[in-house]
Image: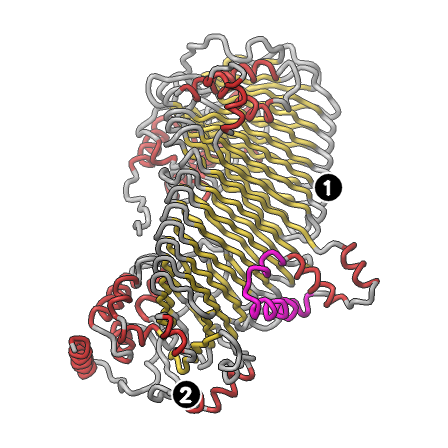
Amino acid sequence: MAAVETTADVSHESALVALFAKVGASLPGASWLQPLRAEALNRVTREGLPHRRLEAWKYTDLRNKLAHGFDLASGKDVSDADVLDGLKGHRVRIVGGKVVGVPDDVPDGLEVISLAEALGMPSLWLRQWLQPTDEAVENLNLAFASDGVLVRVARGLAVKQPVIVRSTLSEAAMAHTRNVIVLEEGAELTLIELDDGAAPGQSFATTVTAISLEPGARLRHLRVTANEGASVVVRADTIEVGRDASYRGIVASSGAAVARQQASARLTAPGAAFARACAYAAGEGQHTDFTMRVTHEAPHTTSRIVSKGVAAGSGHGVVQGLVVVRSEAQKSDSHQLSRALLLTPHAEIDQKPELEIYADDVKCGHGASIGALDESQLFYLQQRGIPEAEARSMLVGAFLGEVTERLPEPYRAPVDAWLTARMTQVTAA
Amino acid sequence: MAEQATIDAVNARAGERYKYGFVTDIESEKAPKGLNADIVRFISAKKNEPEWMLAWRLAAFERWQSMNEPRWAKVSYPPIDFQDAYYYSAPKSKPKLESLDEVDPKLLETYKKLGIPLTEQKLLAGVAVDAVFDSVSVATTFKGKLKEAGVIFCPISEALQTHPELIRKYLGTVVPVTDNFYATLNSAVFSDGSFVYVPPGVRCPMELSTYFRINEAETGQFERTLIIADKGSYVSYLEGCTAPMRDENQLHAAVVELVAMDDAEIKYSTVQNWYPGDENGKGGIYNFVTKRGDCRGARSKISWTQVETGSAITWKYPSCILRGDESVGEFFSIAIANHHQQADTGTKMVHLGRNTRSRIISKGISAGQAQNTYRGLVSAHAKAENARNYTQCDSLLIGAKCGAHTVPYIEARNPTAQFEHEATTSKISDDQLFYCLQRGIPAEEAVTLIVNGFCREVLQNLPMEFAVEAQKLIGVSLEGSVG
């Protein structure tokens, strides 16, 4: 039996402490934030960076995968056209953890500002989003967060065009951003996020996004995590869904060495609904992790989780979904489906769909499957003159299509095109 | 001859050690409270064990001292003081019994109360009973018939004397000494248990059955069971447990090892009904069991069926290592938790060989304020071509204060593996209940009826005698959960 992993080697953590001593004072924020940052870093050093001995990180050994001694990114921009270029919307640009462009033509009632700027104003409403937690990545992010975007939609406003946030990291360095998205009562918004960039060495980006949906608010959320090369990307979302509010998200991820998307959603009042669909293609040297936790805290709440993914080469796909139904949350309705295709030997898929239920009058279920491409389907296509490689990507495309087909136009076409291109790379390997 | 020499040598050495620091009389029926190397030696000496066995136990004990109790299960209980328990106790010792007539009538009376028709066993067709009263097996029947078939079925302590080579070859090969905290503890202090060896090509002529019973106050039980089905053989083993009311929490840490060689099949059925504590969660057995089967040979099959209704805390994952090509693993489970019971149970299906298949059907029922968790692992290693698994785990909740949880781990490293997992959670629908009530069936009976229907797929896999008992047990276990 392996000995309990000791944290005797604290080089990761001590490098972080040294970095904080160097740059801490120059990070944005009013004086109230500095002690919170210090406390957050304290917690990181005390518990260590997440490693596989922690149940939530069982399949993603972040501590082991991370290089040592990162500096904070300087904000170098090597941007070219992005996969969502053609889309119209209110565009926010984040480079190396700093907001370099916010839209100025937003309609009345929509606020889109940078976190660094907001922290410069004597406002305390942000404080609730900037607290140390018991989650290592969130704490690390808080300690070093350099910027982020704040989006606030006023009561009853349905924003017509999407807010598009593109965040690029193209340096072998660290960038930590923190976003806050607030939809007031009855507001509606489509939020599109694109993560990209490839660095000459390992890069490490974390983004913590707090989403608050007040009664009746509706958020459509699309995220494409398209970082490449040795990028390590960790996304942590906390989503609070109020009475009759709804969150519908689609997350697609492919390309990064390590991409972890963790989400913790709370359904706090009757009628709250949460849905997230995930698609991933993990090719040679890529590790993709979706970890979700949905807590039904009130009666008559609904949650749906769907994930579909493929792994090839030495690709590794991880899907962990935990649905908790509290005893107050009678009449909850929850379903989770995770399906995955293993395309080649040496690829790995791990799934853990969990249920934790404390109420009896509920409808909860999950389904999970892992398998290979159906040989008979492949044969059918080849019989009709379609070359094997093409037939394979056709079938894989159809498999992942169950996620992207939930997207309305004009968003679907570019995401489909991107995913197809990635998938072809992955399956060709 | 050599064996006897070894035994004598051990006795001599054991006696020597007692002289210097260990005061308990070797003839005493109980080792003193607590656990140390001397207790381990005492147990070993008491059993007249060969020296290698003692060394094995001592190595386990040394290992155990450096281990920590597992804390990952979804159960909570006050810390256990492992020094505040007896690790060995024997019933009024008597030399080997020739027939049932020689058995202490008081003992027979107890069995009768428990509903074990021991005296009727000889009349009943096809069931041999190796009854464990506390730690030592006191009665074994139907030996003749088994002997004819060449099947060895005896207490493991006896097997250590008569077939030490088999024990030495297989013991600890499925559940290694270092496996986990409780298995290691068991390896150090195991008291007794069953040993079964079915020779090649033999179909065991009857279902083998053991009734375990915990009786003496504050005595932890550490059974060790080892079943070997050699090439092309078949055996069905039944294990049933009952225990009388008591206040003190009791620790039970058994280890069961199954080995199936080429084309062999082992069917292992359990009905577990130990004292679960009273309605307020006071008392009850702590059941921390390690059960594992090794499908070592090609085309071998191991099938676990369990009905878990008792114990305050259940921590149990009967597993299959599907090593042989085309081997098959099955797990059928009913776990009922009522009042304050906590059950964290499930299985592991580890696919190593080619074309291996496994099936998991788990039915969890929670009532009162109980917590019931299914925890399972299905994994395919890189060489497990065409591994196939189907898992279904259903939970039924009765009442608003209980919990039902599902924690499946699904890990695939082979593209030809095909895994499917389904889970549902539901309650007894008002329609079903109303339908029964309308027809004059009282609520409690109606619940039993519906729950029996919910569990049908698993009950069908039990041997007949057990199925009847299990159905009754379900009703008894759910008493007080309605209304």
Where residue B252 appears, x then y in whole percent?
Answer: 43, 69
For residue A270, which numbered disc appears in the image? 1
**Magenta residue span:** B456-481
Quick check: B81 above or below A400?
Answer: below
Residue B311 shows in this picture: no
Where residue A30 appears, x then y in whole percent?
Answer: 50, 28
Amino acid of disc 2: Ser
Residue located 32% across and 29% down the image: A67
| Closer to the camera in the image, A35 or B171 | B171
Assess whether residue A410 is covered by the magenta stretch.
no
Assess whether residue B458 is covered by the magenta stretch.
yes
Type of secondary structure dominating the magenta stretch: helix
Question: Where, by quadrant of the figure, is residue B224 drawn?
Answer: bottom left
For residue B152, which numbered disc appears in the image? none
Residue located 73% across and 30% down the image: A185
Can you say which quadrant of the picture contains the C terminus of chain A? top left
Local crowd at mark 1 within 10 Å, few (<14), some, or many (≥20)? many
Chain to which mark 1 belongs: A
**Dot 1 lies on which element?**
loop
Color encoding of the figure: secondary structure
Quick check: A124 above or below B149?
Answer: above
Amino acid of disc 1: Pro
Question: Where, by quadrant of the figure, is residue B180 drawn?
Answer: bottom left
Q: In the image, are marks 1 and 2 on the same chain?
A: no
Where residue A359 appears, x then y in whole percent?
Answer: 66, 52
**Dot 2 lies on which element?**
loop
Mark in the foreground, 1 or 2: 2
Mark 2 = which residue? B99
Residue A236 shows in this picture: yes
Chain to which mark 2 belongs: B
Instruction: Check if mark 1's residue and mark 2's residue have beta carbons within 8 Å.
Output: no
- How far apart are labels 1 and 2 at the CA level? 69 Å
